[in-house]
Image (cartoon, rainbow, N blue to C red):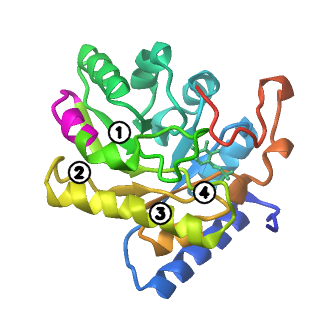
Amino acid sequence: MNFASSVAEALDAVCRNILEAQKKSGRKQGVQVVAVTKNVGMEKMREAIEAGLSSFGENRVQEALPKIEAIGKKVSWRMVGHLQSNKVKKAVEYFDAIDSVDSFGLAAEISKAAKAKNRIMPVLLEVNTSGEPSKYGLSPEKTLEEAEKIAGLENLSVDGLMTVGPLANEEKKLRAAFARLRQLFEEIEQKKIFGLLFRHLSMGMSADYPMAVEEGATMVRLGTAIFGPRTQNIENPSASSGFIPRQASG
Ligand SMILES: *Cc1c(COP(=O)(O)O)cnc(C)c1O
């Protein structure tokens, strides 16, 4: 990857790549860019807002809270990393959406916390489309069944599905994972398990988002493609996990 010198330039390239992927596939879905800002400092975050980004993804509650407090609600905040039970209340209080609902138990806890706060929490269900044991997510075989159970919970708005593609840089494997998520999405849609807000397919990260858009992504989660390699953004190296593991807990 080549890295642009500014967030605005990088975003420009991202938009061009998204348009090109849509042209290639003939799809015309709207694609929302979620800027993943883990390890990204305040200065770059402000630059991102200036460049027009309005949706930020964080994968750790602890790292996100001070940023949300400093920047506020002029942008929306999405929790994209695995959410631990003891952080559910804070996540429901601070975030606008939780994209990483990977079990019925977690969905139930979010539902309970949302009810206590008298709000409806927008969420996405995370599916482990690659089957890699290091990844979180519902297994594709069980997703439909779990979705039906989750649909019975109060104070949740299930707006779509999310996946983290396989680590392998193999186009065939990546496409298969993205296509699997789209297929599950269509099945859930046809069965009318959730309401009309069920509309998002969050898939594709810096290394693979053009392919994800070709396969139908409506939301791409981009860190490196917008902010450059994470090691350059780290302000507090001891709090950082860098690139590995790809999906940290929070
Ligand atoms: C870090 C992260 C991203 C963005 O990763 P890049 O490869 O830097 O684009 C996307 N989704 C999740 C869940 C992440 O943790």
The residues colored magenta run 146-155
Tag 2 or tag 4, which sits nearer the N-term?
2
Q: On screen, 143 above or below 85?
A: below
Which quarter of the figure is the N terminus placed in? bottom right
Question: 10 Å neighbourhood of mark 2: few (<14), some, or many (≥20)?
Answer: few
Q: Amino acid at mark 3?
A: Phe
Which amino acid type is marked by label 4? Met
Q: Is residue 163 left or right of residue 12?
A: left
Residue ID at (55%, 29%): 68
Circle 2 is placed at which residue position? Answer: 197
**Rendered image: mark on residue 51:** none
Tell me the number on the disc at residue 205.
4
Q: Is residue 173 above or below residue 202?
A: below
Name the disc covering residue 178, or none. Answer: 3
Gap between marks 4 and 2, in whole Å? Answer: 23 Å
Q: Is residue 15 visible?
A: no
- Magenta stretch contains residue 26: no
Q: Position of residue 114 (x, y in %)?
A: 29, 22
| Pointers 1 and 3 in contact (C-beta within 8 Å) | no
N-terminal-most mark, 2 or 1 = 1
Q: Earlier in the sequence, mark 1 or mark 4?
A: 1
Marks 1/4: CA distance?
19 Å
The residue under label 1 is: 123
Mark 1: amino acid: Val
What whole-number distance in Å separates the C-alpha atoms at marks 2 and 1? Answer: 11 Å
Q: Comparing marks 1 and 3, which lies closer to the viewer?
A: 3
